[in-house]
């Protein structure tokens, strides 16, 4: 008789597991997005950059001109290369005689060599310079130390 009750218990457990599995399957099917259409699957980005399920407010729409979109690396125009610029020497290696100037407008770092400077320079000096395209990219030439305005 003990075997029969164990067998009955196993049968009950099997039926219970099968019932739970069917309930989970029905729940998954009810919550599924399959076949509910495109609108149910859409996600939007609001004006704060957060994902949302509601379309964005049209009053926050920003018009962007196609010609303002730039793909790839920034290209420098010829007039940009030859115009004098201002910056601060952010890094200077006295042993190797080169450094980098941080442009005051674009915050871009531009390489320079001591042979392209007029006089002694050190880190923190404010300088004017021109840029040229060299074999390894843009570099500063005609680097002139500026007197700080007091």
Image (cartoon, rainbow, N blue to C red):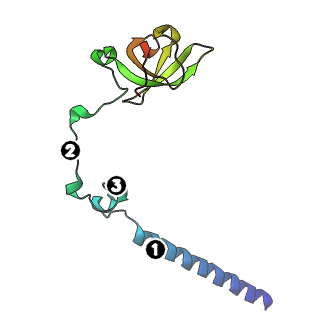
Residue 51 position, x and y percent, is 37, 57
User: Which residue is painted at 69% across and 87% down in the image?
Assistant: 8
Q: Secondary structure at mark 3?
A: loop
> Tag on residue 146?
none
Residue named by callout 2: 63
Residue named by callout 1: 27
Query: Is 120 on the left-hand or right-hand side of 14?
Result: left
Residue 141 position, x and y percent, is 42, 12
The correct choice, above or below, for 105 with respect to 26 in the image is above
Residue 10 position, x and y percent, is 69, 81
Gap in angstroms between the C-alphas marked 3 and 2: 16 Å
View extreme (bottom): residue: 1
Neighbour tally class for label 2: few under 14, some 14-19, many 20 plus, Cα within 10 Å? few
Neighbour tally class for label 1: few under 14, some 14-19, many 20 plus, Cα within 10 Å? few
Question: Upstream in the sequence, badge 3 or badge 2?
Answer: 3
Neighbour tally class for label 3: few under 14, some 14-19, many 20 plus, Cα within 10 Å? few
The correct choice, above or below, for 19 with respect to 1 in the image is above
Would residue 76 be visible to someone looking at this image?
yes
């Amino acid at each position: 008789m003990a075997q029969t009750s164990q067998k009955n218990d196993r049968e009950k457990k099997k039926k219970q597991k099968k019932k739970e599995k069917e309930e989970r399957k029905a729940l998954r099917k009810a919550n599924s997005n399959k076949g509910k259409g495109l609108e149910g699957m859409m996600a939007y980005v609001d004006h704060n950059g957060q994902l949302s399920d509601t379309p964005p407010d049209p009053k926050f729409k920003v018009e962007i001109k196609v010609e303002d979109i730039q793909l790839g690396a920034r290209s420098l125009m010829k007039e940009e290369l030859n115009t004098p610029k201002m910056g601060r020497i952010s890094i200077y290696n006295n042993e190797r005689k080169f450094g980098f100037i941080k442009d005051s407008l674009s915050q871009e770092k531009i390489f320079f060599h001591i042979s392209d400077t007029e006089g002694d320079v050190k880190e923190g000096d404010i300088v004017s310079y021109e840029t040229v395209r060299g074999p390894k990219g843009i570099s500063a030439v005609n680097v002139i130390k500026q007197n700080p305005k007091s």
